[in-house]
Image: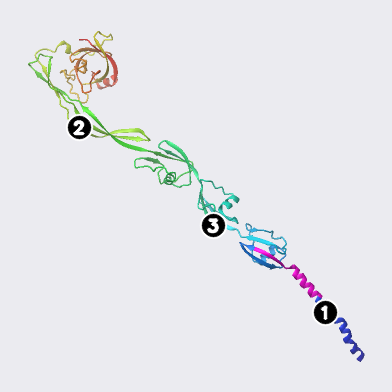
Amino acid sequence: MNLKSKRMPTLMKKFVLPFVGVLALVAFTTLFILEAKSATVTVSIDGDEQEVDTRAHTVGELLEDLDVEVGENDYLSMDLDEELTNGATIKYEKANNVYITIDGETDTYQTTKKTLADFFSESDIEVTKNDHVSHEFDQEIFDTLHVVIHKAFEVTVDDGGKKETVWTTRARVKDLLEEQNIELPKKDDKIKPKLNKQLTKEGTIKITRVEKETETVEEAIAFDTETKNDSSLERGKKKTVSEGKEGKKVKEYEIIYENGKVVERKLIGENIEKQPKNKVVAIGTKKKQPKNLVQVSSSNKSSGQPNGKTYRMSATAYTADCAGCSGVTSTGINLKKNRNAKVIAVDPSIIPLGSKVWVEGYGYAIAGDTGGSIKGNRIDVHVPSQSAAYRFGRKTVKVVIVD
């Protein structure tokens, strides 16, 4: 028993020393392995850069340890399953939400682009130079950025007859006109559609420019001829007792132009500035009217031109009931009592009153009347009715003084 007890310590020493060595070796190996699995990497998260000691095997494991959840549109410089190596640099940027409203409809986009211009380049959003964008293209993108876009469309503007096609994003007619520096309609102008109406794509704005001006016209008022019987004169002879004087009438007209063209001319005022003074003629009653003053029958027409001093004259027609007419000629012929009388009004300085004449297309007549507007080579032929006067119109005819 004593022998055994003495040998035990010796045996224990032989076994204990190798076992401790094994444990030390295992601990060292484990520490070496653990140290071998650790790596130092540079991680940039949204621009915030830091060095990280990690024992993660992959990029995904590292980001998971850092509580970074990578979204579909986020930026990551390395793949999630890529194995980490010591000294690696990993960049991560979270995508920003960008809200784009186009003509009232809003869509949400996610992007890591830095500016709006870069975002438009990568997206399927087409923006033209005529569109209206709420932000500049160099706008830095941040989360929840809201951009409003109004797409431009074509509108035809007809301004006073001049057409032009323009691009606009404006909602109302008035806004477009101001945008294009087109003069807004004035009080009398016409516009369709109205200024406050909504614009429609490929629509037309029509502006009719209306101008008004007044015109003053002076007109002579013909004097009448008053006759009175004079028993001291032979029948058919006459004597001017007092000369007539024309009056003066002033008329004011309003002239309306649309796009430079006259569309209406209306009388808005009339004033008699000077009353006419009648001419007074004394008519002899001693004898019958001489032959050269005998009224000629309406059937007395001749297609053949007689001999005599011939003129070419402008001819119009009048009746006994014309405006300003008394129905009695300046030589005393009562046309109301003889509506078929062949009488013409003349300028006495060209054709003496009482002359027998022949008028082309009218026949033989007596130069028995005058008129305020009958001057020079002009005559006025008497016809029985207003309709006949309209039919006669104005024409150039031959006039022959027969005697």
* Residue drawn at point x = 53 percent, y = 56 percent: 146
Which residue is outermost to the left? Answer: 232
Taking the image as shown, residue 219 lies to the left or right of residue 140, namely: left
Q: Write down the region rendered in magenta.
A: 25-43
Quarter holding the C terminus is: top left
Q: Residues within 10 Å of mark 3 (few under 14, many from 20)?
A: some
Amino acid bearing label 2:
Ile
* Residue drawn at point x = 87 percent, y = 81 percent: 15
Magenta run includes residue 39: yes
Question: Disc 2 marks which residue?
Answer: 272
Mark 3 vs mark 1, CA separation in Å: 67 Å
Question: Residue 141 is drawn in which quadrant?
Answer: bottom right
Question: Disc 3 marks which residue?
Answer: 145
Amino acid bearing label 1:
Val
* Residue drawn at point x = 34 percent, y = 35 percent: 257
Question: Residue 258 is drawn in which quadrant?
Answer: top left
Choose the circle earlier in sequence order: 1 or 2: 1
Helix or strand or loop: what does disc 3 sit on?
strand
Residue 396 vs residue 196, the one in the foreground: 396
